[in-house]
Image (cartoon, grey):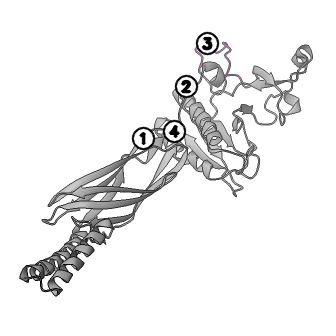
Amino acid sequence: MKSKIIYMVLVLATLWAAAAGRGEFAFFLLVFELLFAVCMAAGVWYVAGKLRVSAKTESSAVTRGEREKFILEIENSTVFPVGDIQIVMDVTGAGRIIRHTAADRKSRDSWQIFLEPVHCGFFRVGVTELRVFDYLGLFSAKIRIPSLARTIAVIPRIHPMDEETVQGFYGEEEDNENAARAGTDSQEIFDTRYYHQGDMLKNIHWKLSAKEDELLVKEFSMPAGRMVSVYLDTSGGTEEKTTPDQLDEFLDLAASLGNALVEKEQLFEYVWMEKGTKEALHFEVNGKEAFYQALECIPGICQGISDNVLVPEHGGVRITMDGRIQRYFPEGEGRL
């Protein structure tokens, strides 16, 4: 805008000099200034129509907190170099971003920006406008572009889990059939913990509770060879009270437990409900590849909180919003 004002003042001054009869040079200069402006405007519009732009990201998913690269490839097929291309972007969590780049003549150049998503979910970055400016900044023209938006799944972080935490969630084969090990016997009491509201009364260990003067609940090991269902239960929170940080911690725990099960070669499935749905969604995990595919899906849970408490239909593990991991088993399968 400043350059336009300066150039307009220059043209008006030259026009005044020519009208006042200050000589032929003033008239020649006025004609040159007007023709120069016309050439700049025509050049900008011509180049804007010849530029071709495409967009890409390095991957479809990125771990929360890591950097992801958004790349624009700009192809200039004209003989005119472009000194200023304005890029207007809309980025989730950052709003409107404006950057500038350039393109040499007869070239294919790339421009990139590094993005660092803060929370799990789906991260969208898109170019809303590209505009070419002339060398003096007097005129500009929009570049016609296709949809240059990309959506990236921001997956949870994976933290190491100690053996005591995951032991009992999977079965292991024994060379000696008579050897007993936690996690291989569906009848076995694996551990005890303090009673939480919602625990079944039949699982209370009354003898130990009387001894400790605290209600203690039995925790059983998973039956050997059975698929483990990992229930992602967000029913303990509400959209108004649940913060993005709490959801991140919840999904980190789900990813970390899933990774531990994959390392133990335990077949399992993630089960969750999205807001407004009455049927549970299942994603079976039978290896590393399926595990990372699941991680790209479960951030969708960030978009809504389930309306009803998720009740397991068969044996499995439930992860709650307060960071607890609870074991669940079918009714009547040797449970006390």
Q: Nearer the viewer, mark 2 or mark 3?
A: 2
Apparent side of residue 43 relative to residue 274 in the rendered image (left or right): left
Name the residue carrying label 4: 291
Q: Dot 2: within a 10 Å radius of its alpha carbon, few (fewer than 14), some, or many (20 or more) residues? A: few
Q: Nearer the viewer, mark 1 or mark 3?
A: 1
Name above or below for residue 45 compared with residue 98. below
Task: Measuring from the top left, give residue 41's x and y in whole percent.
Answer: 22, 75
What amino acid does circle 4 point to? Answer: Phe
Q: Which residues are magenta?
A: 172-185
The alpha-carbon separation of the residues under discs 1 and 3 comes to: 49 Å
| Quadrant housing the N terminus | bottom left
The residue lying furthest to the left in this view is 24
Q: Which mark is residue 176?
A: 3
What amino acid does circle 3 point to? Answer: Asn
The alpha-carbon separation of the residues under discs 2 and 3 comes to: 30 Å
Task: Measuring from the top left, give residue 172's x and y in whole percent.
Answer: 60, 22
Which circle's residue, 2 or 3, is located before the other in the chain? 2
Q: Which residue occupies the foreground of this view, 217 or 48? A: 48
Name the residue carrying label 1: 67
Q: Nearer the viewer, mark 1 or mark 4?
A: 1
Is label 3 in a helix, a strand or a loop? loop
Q: Nearer the viewer, mark 3 or mark 4?
A: 4
Which circle's residue, 2 or 4, is located before the other in the chain? 2
